[in-house]
Image (tube, coloured by chain):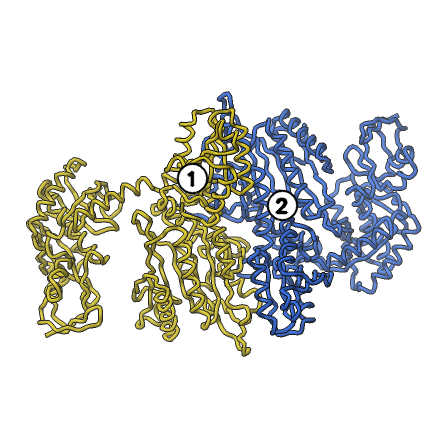
Chain colours: A blue, B yellow
Amino acid sequence: MINITLPDGSVRQYKKGTTSLDIAKSISEGLARKVLSASVNGQVWDAARPITGDATLKLLTWNDADGKNTFWHSSAHLMAEAVETMFPGVKFWVGPPVENGFYYDMDLGDKKMTEEDLTALEKKMNELAKQSNSYIRKEMPKSEAVKYFTEKGDEYKLDLLQNLNDGEITFYTQGNFTDLCRGPHIPNTGFIKAIKLMSIAGAYWKGDEKNKMLTRLYGVTFPSQKELDEYLQMLEEAKKRDHRKLGKELGIYTLDDDVGPGLIMWLPNGTVMIEELEKLAKETELEAGYKRVVTPHIAKESMYITSGHLPYYAESMYPPMEMEGEKYYLRSMNCPHHHKIFAATPKSYRDLPYRVAEYGTVYRYEQSGELFGLMRVRCLHMNDAHIYCSKEQFNDEFRAVNDMYLKYFKIFGIDKYVMRLSLHSKEKLGIKYVNEPELWLETEAMVRNVLKESNIPYVEVQDEAAFYGPKIDVQIWSVIGREFTLATNQVDFSQGRSFKLQYTTADNHTETPLIIHRAPLGTHERFIGFLLEHYAGKLPLWLAPVQVKVLPISDKFLDYAKAVSDKLKKADIRSEVDDRNEKIGKKIRDTELLKVPYMLVVGEKEMNENKVAVRRQGKGDAGVKGVDEFIAEATAEIKERRAE
Amino acid sequence: MINITLPDGSVRQYKKGTTSLDIAKSISEGLARKVLSASVNGQVWDAARPITGDATLKLLTWNDADGKNTFWHSSAHLMAEAVETMFPGVKFWVGPPVENGFYYDMDLGDKKMTEEDLTALEKKMNELAKQSNSYIRKEMPKSEAVKYFTEKGDEYKLDLLQNLNDGEITFYTQGNFTDLCRGPHIPNTGFIKAIKLMSIAGAYWKGDEKNKMLTRLYGVTFPSQKELDEYLQMLEEAKKRDHRKLGKELGIYTLDDDVGPGLIMWLPNGTVMIEELEKLAKETELEAGYKRVVTPHIAKESMYITSGHLPYYAESMYPPMEMEGEKYYLRSMNCPHHHKIFAATPKSYRDLPYRVAEYGTVYRYEQSGELFGLMRVRCLHMNDAHIYCSKEQFNDEFRAVNDMYLKYFKIFGIDKYVMRLSLHSKEKLGIKYVNEPELWLETEAMVRNVLKESNIPYVEVQDEAAFYGPKIDVQIWSVIGREFTLATNQVDFSQGRSFKLQYTTADNHTETPLIIHRAPLGTHERFIGFLLEHYAGKLPLWLAPVQVKVLPISDKFLDYAKAVSDKLKKADIRSEVDDRNEKIGKKIRDTELLKVPYMLVVGEKEMNENKVAVRRQGKGDAGVKGVDEFIAEATAEIKERRAE
């Protein structure tokens, strides 16, 4: 008998050679139908693979990232089988799971695959899936594997074999398809219920443009048709909400070749959004007792050696500027400058917690190929802050940071979010992690405690902390279900010491403060990109670059329109007049496209009664109102930062 | 007879060989007593030098920079004469006028000059001045001059002679002192009525540390004792108001070796000032129809080649960062980025004037030795903006910019200011200036006209415009009479073309806009430095980092003090509680030193009546008031940005 430890800590005994699938069945048949693979002693295995010794076991389903990867990797094999039936003689390179689905790179010889083939391939895949063919694992001596592919004339798999050692080579077979593969795979093809082939692309063998161009076929699969339908609908919606498309249409940002890739230039409308976000953060932080600072974007090499950015983070930084025998670097993080602010004047326990906030701009080198709209850029504006506190103050400070997140989530209608708490690993203390076993356990417990007490959904991840303390990654989902990494919170034992930061305690000793790194709005760039998608460009009133457009029915009412608009401006409402010589219908249509929240139509009647005919973007007529009445309503909507 | 043209354009006839002094006397004896030198055909001459041909003449007095320089240069000779009497055998190097006075570098052999010698030297100078010895000019063949100094054994003057050509060598003699000197000089030593020797310093010969160390003696002189007294008093006051001293005492800014020289780090109190200035500028600019943008601090080399910053301005820029085969530069000006914003979307006459504002940060390389507190720095934050307009709109736009200056001057109590209008020179069109003769005359006339109509004091300077248009330098004086260059306004015909900026006119042609470069608050750094001196650190309420300090008489009233402070904060008043266990007298003294505008003392009586005992910084008791009454008064004072 062997002992199997389950995630809840319970230990069950099974016969030696039992499989994860057997264990799942012993718990419930329903569970067994969902098991895609299993984590056995931390390694992902086929659910059908016999377990021969004591093990910790986690059954993996569609809800686990590793389960999903198994599903998609098996789908790539299924796709390859279908391709082989339609393109005999095809040779395969690699077929991994990716963020949303999977692909397979293949050499079709002198044949060509077209968009029209995709339907037939999908049909074939569905047919093969219905056969519920098992994925059968077979260990293979290297010599035999080489012989097999040599006879087949498959130079690609032979190339892969070169880097594999004898004893670690496995083949997987489902139906009539056999592949050299490390696995794992799902139990059988019947799990794959919904299939969509997405696109065909070219990809150089091994990513090297000197090599042959292979055909890359992308697909995505799901355990049910409903999930596929939802996914395709989300994609359709995401396309409409693409922040790059909206960013251009709404005049949010631009890029320029002479400035450089990834260096966003914020146009007037985008700048209004930035300033409204800053205002929100400043108000929030003022109330929470933060002090604001302004620091330069550059510093000498010596600062980044102290902080450890150099040499460890050098490849993510812009190259240095050399002058007067010194190297200056554009900063990639604000923390070192803030540490220097802390150190600039002597600190005592009376000064703690010392909370330093800055709308800091940082520069990070991202490969040109990685740059993507507002999501991956080289110049980032951050609502950044660092909190220097004593161990006793940590709990309250960390809780306050969490509360700030929750406040922001509420304002922006972010209903789905999760915090990913990355912990240290005991074995790697002094290697990957600062060697402070007690501080680790203590702060991890404090963080966990606050997350629990605040009812914040969170997951724990072992062995992924930062060098200097536990790390919390905040994941949020937009209204259409796309996931974004918003920000990272870090607890820091170490930099305080590196920078020799100290404060005098009440009993006149010196202590090094703990540091909390936090930036709950993440970067302007990513957050505004997220908001554009989240709101489909229909920003809430308080965030809208132009809040009101006054539309005179004809030029006769232009003066009145201007007077109304001026009155709105005096009341701090961002207002414009559509003074073009156009029909009112066209004015309304154009303003709708610009997603201006309110349109005030004015004609004879409105002018005579000092009123406006209100239209809400996307919703049409909202009645005739007095100008002052409208101002009062709009002002309240802005002040409360109402979603609508 | 010769024709002498005076500054008012009138022409008078005089005998050939007449002197400027004679001409002054022919106008009025009183004027003649004030003439220090004269500008003859644009060259500064001795007032006593005979004029032998037709000339334009400007008599120079103490009120002209060149007159003052003559006065101080002559004072250096007087000082040298005094030194020679007390240190026989002294050899002199050079003795120029400087910003506030003059110095002379000298080799005292094995003797040493001490602070004690200064009084005796001053006495001797006064004695020599009273002799009213004339400064007598004598032309000298080079051979004779060399012979003279060879016999004297004066290697310093021989060194100077090496670089002079025969025919241009002159000697000046007053009393018993003769010097090799280009001149000009004042008529006689009797003009020098008040003398102060300031300090002794060491200075390497020719500024090279491999050379001998000479003695540099600084002095300052005036035409009256009253002016000297005022100057010394101003210096005394300026010392107390030194922005570096106040900057430290009030927690405004700091510098750090690891960040780098000239890179200001704004501490929380300084950041409040920055944010209040930004708020003022944003409000002002919003009302004036500016749009705000945010752009990166770097750009590719290609942009700065288009703008002409490279190679012409390269030595004032940080060196480039090289990556991906491109050079990136930290920007030293914001204009090119703004031009790119203008170009980002098609523009029509309806979009003009297009006013783009940004709190832009720029980086400029200043020699380490030139760096000085907040006045000369390497990282500058600017309230910058560029206005793109048609020729027809220029007048109104430029006037609006001027009005903005006047608004700011009023808010900050800047009573003395002057605009220095730099014009082109016809002869240098196409060389030093864009070859657009009509545009030059037209815009210069427009600028002049606006300055006149706005009653702004201004002076015109020939041949000092920017390459691309007339330039206005704004000079202001602090309350103690120190002069600061605040900002530069520029009219620009040229960059619009370099950047291919265009707009569609009403009749469907394309035109290049005119550009106004403006930054009326100058840089944060310099302006805050100015304000610290101007207000002696006693900032007006709206600018004060901490506006109110609540001082409980004892711990018994701490809770009440905190409640008052919280109420103030809710009303957006920056308030703190002095919760130290100190006597009220000490609390008041310490708060006075921090120059917090209002102190609210609270004890038994105040607590029971929900009142506060108000003290105004530097003024003492201001009566007991209800908390709400105080809040209403302070809020009004802040909102109106009252000086006090």
Report the Cα–Cα distance between label 2 and label 1: 35 Å
Q: Of A471 and B351, which appears nearest the observer? A: B351
Q: Report whether residue B264 is seen.
A: yes
- Disc 2 is placed on an element classified as loop
Rendered view: A286 above or below A56: below
**Are the residues under badges 2 and 1 in a single subunit?**
no
| Residue B374 in the figure: left or right of residue A79 | left
Q: Quadrant of residue B493?
A: bottom left
Q: Position of residue B587 (x, y in %)?
A: 43, 29
Rendered image: mark on residue B597: 1
Residue type at mark 1: give it: Pro
- Disc 1 is placed on an element classified as loop
| Residue B285 in the figure: left or right of residue A49 | left
Q: Position of residue A464 (x, y in %)?
A: 67, 36
Residue type at mark 2: give it: Leu
Q: Position of residue B258 (x, y in %)?
A: 45, 39
Question: What residue is pinned by disc 2?
Answer: A521
Q: Of B426 and A535, which appears nearest the observer? A: A535
